[in-house]
Image (cartoon, coloured by chain):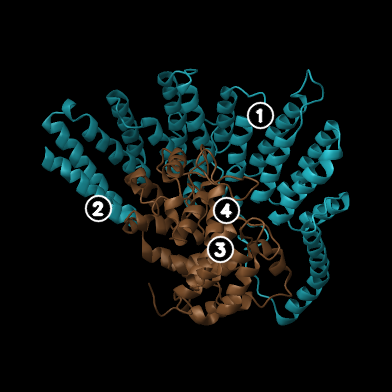
Chain colours: A cyan, B brown
């Protein structure tokens, strides 16, 4: 964290090359999540509090009333579900219980069963559309409070997919288009609050690929640019960018050669702003790829070297240099004479020795890499 | 590491007491608000106890009876709590508990196998239940459960692996579904003996870079550390035989510093409220 402050205090000016649009906001406060996302408990990111015996008693007393109400409610919902009660009353009860506890996946399932078995069969399509739109609004308030609860996101998917044809035969996709467009707006709001929420990113990809009228992928590319400009530490946005670009290249909509140059520019700006940010280096490694293009590989090695000269203690500069030089030895050995090969090998060995020193936690990895580099020596 | 400092040792008696106390807090609101996780919580508690060599601290019969009371006879699998719907997450936990307690003979194995296999989608990924949320976490649950039940041969391995393969990213990691960002908690290939699908060097590099200066591990680049990733990242590194690529002493010190010295249990990071999920992954990581 100190490193960040250092940069913010002006460690990042360099021949006007750094783009002022780049900022590095750490989204660390937004961390809470698990494989099984749980907002009620296990309470992640909740500070441990020491209660006195009396305070503990008082807290328990206050909770008792709430607990009693909740248990009666939850039990009655589960009892109705057991006897397949598909009534509006039952629906109303699921609303109440989910407001208290949106983690009850069984009750979300029950809610959908009530719609499918009790309510939709006697409703006009326009009513079905209204009900689903209402449920999307209803779950929006949940989502704001519990952005990492899988079941809420799932319920929204189900609602969207259940929207009927309409409003008219000629405009059969009308309702769908309107709901899905709104959904994209919702997911953008969620990513504004927490730009690293992986549930929201997964959901975004789902919406983009499922909406009845697809948006051009260039729009998504522009979205990732905005996210990266707001905070280049956002690896989720870089990741999305790599996916969108690959897709645009595969479809022949953009030229990989021209694009790649622009991407190198973008990533270089970020790199110079904070050479300690992992996101940027991981993305850079993707751009370099297998390193088959000797000209690009050499140019990037030179460029990283230049940055290292200015930031002589930058671990990521050194780590990347070793990786790219190793690619050179692997892929382009026929272009090198003995002296050049020796020079590359020696510089890798020096860098790896420094890395063992400045990044002792990963010392063994650097030792293993040293062994690998030494093998080039014996092979030659 | 200073072994004299009490905060730098794993306080086993206190954690055992903490886990035992969890089942006795039935007048606690939070206890009931987490009913949807009960089956998982019992598995986490039991496994943590086993690792600390105190398996007997929770009564076996009572536990097996609870698991059986969560059987969803309509679906043919386990819910997280009596009267909750069957789900793959709770079904795996149930099978794990019954395996640990040597009580798999209590269940109709062919029916559970049928339930699990029915959740595989045409793409090869698994859904969590009949409503169809998909995630490679569920592929892992299915593979692990089928393996414990001795029915892995009924799985279409190629189809399962094919989907996971499509979730692989350029950083060497795997995401939750096609297109998703790499996340430290996704892994299933080892049980299927398909480790050749992995780019070992790249993945181990990505995993090793999860360790932060305070010794803790995070789940994705530029995120905060969390004790539970001690398990996910460390077990993956261990499968890849690359545990030495991080600093285990610093990690151990970090996990120990997240202990609650008063009431027992381990939290996600120092000073936070402990819970059984992080206690499990904390002692397992250690």
- Residue A367 is marked as 2
In the picture, measured across the screen, residue A330 lies left or right of residue A233, that is left
Q: Quadrant of the N terminus of chain B?
A: bottom left
Q: Nearer the viewer, residue B35 or A35?
A: B35
Residue pointed to by mark 3: B108
**Subunit that carries the residue with mark 4:** B
Q: Earlier in the sequence, mark 3 or mark 4?
A: 3
Q: Are marks 4 and 2 on the same chain?
A: no
Label 4 and label 2: CA atoms lie apart by 48 Å
**Subunit that carries the residue with mark 3:** B
In the picture, measured across the screen, residue A57 lies left or right of residue B57, that is right
Residue pointed to by mark 4: B115
Q: Nearer the viewer, residue B147 or A268?
A: B147
Residue in the image at 76% along x and 23% along y: A172
> Circle 3 sits in a helix, a strand or a loop, which is it?
loop
Q: Earlier in the sequence, mark 1 or mark 2?
A: 1
> Circle 2 sits in a helix, a strand or a loop, which is it?
helix
């Amino acid at each position: 964290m100190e490193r960040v402050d250092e940069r913010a205090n002006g460690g990042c000016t360099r021949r006007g090359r750094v783009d002022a649009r780049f900022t590095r906001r750490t989204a660390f406060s937004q961390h809470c999540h698990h494989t099984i996302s749980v907002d009620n408990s296990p309470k992640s990111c909740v500070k441990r509090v020491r209660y006195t015996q009396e305070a503990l008693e008082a807290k328990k007393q206050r909770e008792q009333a709430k607990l009693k109400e909740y248990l009666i409610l939850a039990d009655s919902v589960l009892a109705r579900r057991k006897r397949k009660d598909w009534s509006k009353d039952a629906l109303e009860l699921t609303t109440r219980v989910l407001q208290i506890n949106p983690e009850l996946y069984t009750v979300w399932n029950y809610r959908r069963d009530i719609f499918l078995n009790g309510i939709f069969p006697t409703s006009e399509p326009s009513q079905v559309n209204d009900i689903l739109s209402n449920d999307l609004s209803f779950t929006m308030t949940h989502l704001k409070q519990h952005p990492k609860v899988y079941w809420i996101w799932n319920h929204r998917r189900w609602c969207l997919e259940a929207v009927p044809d309409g409003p008219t035969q000629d405009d059969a996709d009308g309702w769908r288009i309107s709901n899905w467009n709104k959904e994209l707006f919702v997911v953008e709001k969620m990513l504004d609050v927490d730009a690293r929420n992986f549930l929201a990113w997964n959901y975004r990809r789902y919406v983009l690929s499922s909406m009845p009228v697809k948006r051009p992928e260039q729009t998504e590319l522009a979205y990732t640019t905005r996210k990266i400009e707001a905070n280049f530490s956002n690896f989720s946005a870089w990741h999305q960018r790599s996916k969108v670009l690959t897709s645009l290249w595969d479809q022949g909509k953009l030229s990989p050669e021209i694009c790649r140059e622009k991407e190198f520019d973008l990533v270089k700006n970020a790199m110079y702003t904070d050479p300690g940010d992992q996101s940027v280096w991981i993305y850079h490694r993707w751009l370099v790829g297998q390193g088959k293009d000797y000209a690009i590989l050499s140019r990037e090695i030179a460029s990283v070297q230049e940055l290292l000269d200015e930031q002589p203690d930058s671990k990521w500069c050194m780590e990347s240099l070793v990786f790219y030089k190793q690619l050179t030895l692997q892929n382009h050995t026929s272009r090198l004479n003995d002296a050049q090969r020796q020079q590359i090998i020696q510089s890798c060995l020096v860098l790896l020795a420094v890395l063992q020193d400045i990044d002792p936690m990963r010392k063994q990895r650097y030792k293993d890499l040293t062994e690998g580099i030494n093998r080039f020596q014996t092979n030659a | 590491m200073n072994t004299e400092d009490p905060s730098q040792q794993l306080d086993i008696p206190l954690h055992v007491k903490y886990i035992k106390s969890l089942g006795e807090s039935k007048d606690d609101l939070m206890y009931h608000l987490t009913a949807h996780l009960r089956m998982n919580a019992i598995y986490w508690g039991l496994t943590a106890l086993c690792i600390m060599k105190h398996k007997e601290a929770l009564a076996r019969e009572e536990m097996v009876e609870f698991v059986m009371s969560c059987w969803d006879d309509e679906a043919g699998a386990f819910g997280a709590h009596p009267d909750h719907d069957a789900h793959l997450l709770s079904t795996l936990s149930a099978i794990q508990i019954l395996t640990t307690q040597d009580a798999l003979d209590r269940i109709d194995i062919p029916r559970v196998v049928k339930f699990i296999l029915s959740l595989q989608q045409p793409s090869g990924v698994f859904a969590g239940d009949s409503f169809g949320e998909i995630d490679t976490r569920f592929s892992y649950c299915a593979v692990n459960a089928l393996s414990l039940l001795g029915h892995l041969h009924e799985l279409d391995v190629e189809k399962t692996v094919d989907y996971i393969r499509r979730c692989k990213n350029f950083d060497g990691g795997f995401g939750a579904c096609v297109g998703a960002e790499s996340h430290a908690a996704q892994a299933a290939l080892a049980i299927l003996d398909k480790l050749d699908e992995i780019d070992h060097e790249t993945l181990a590099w990505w995993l090793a870079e999860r360790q932060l200066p305070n010794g803790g591990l995070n789940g994705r680049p530029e995120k905060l550390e969390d004790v539970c990733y001690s398990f996910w990242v460390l077990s993956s590194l261990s499968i890849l035989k690359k545990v030495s690529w991080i600093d285990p002493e610093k990690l151990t010190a970090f996990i120990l510093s997240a202990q609650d010295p008063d009431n027992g249990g381990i939290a996600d990071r120092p000073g936070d409220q402990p819970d059984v999920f992080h206690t499990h992954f904390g002692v397992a990581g250690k």
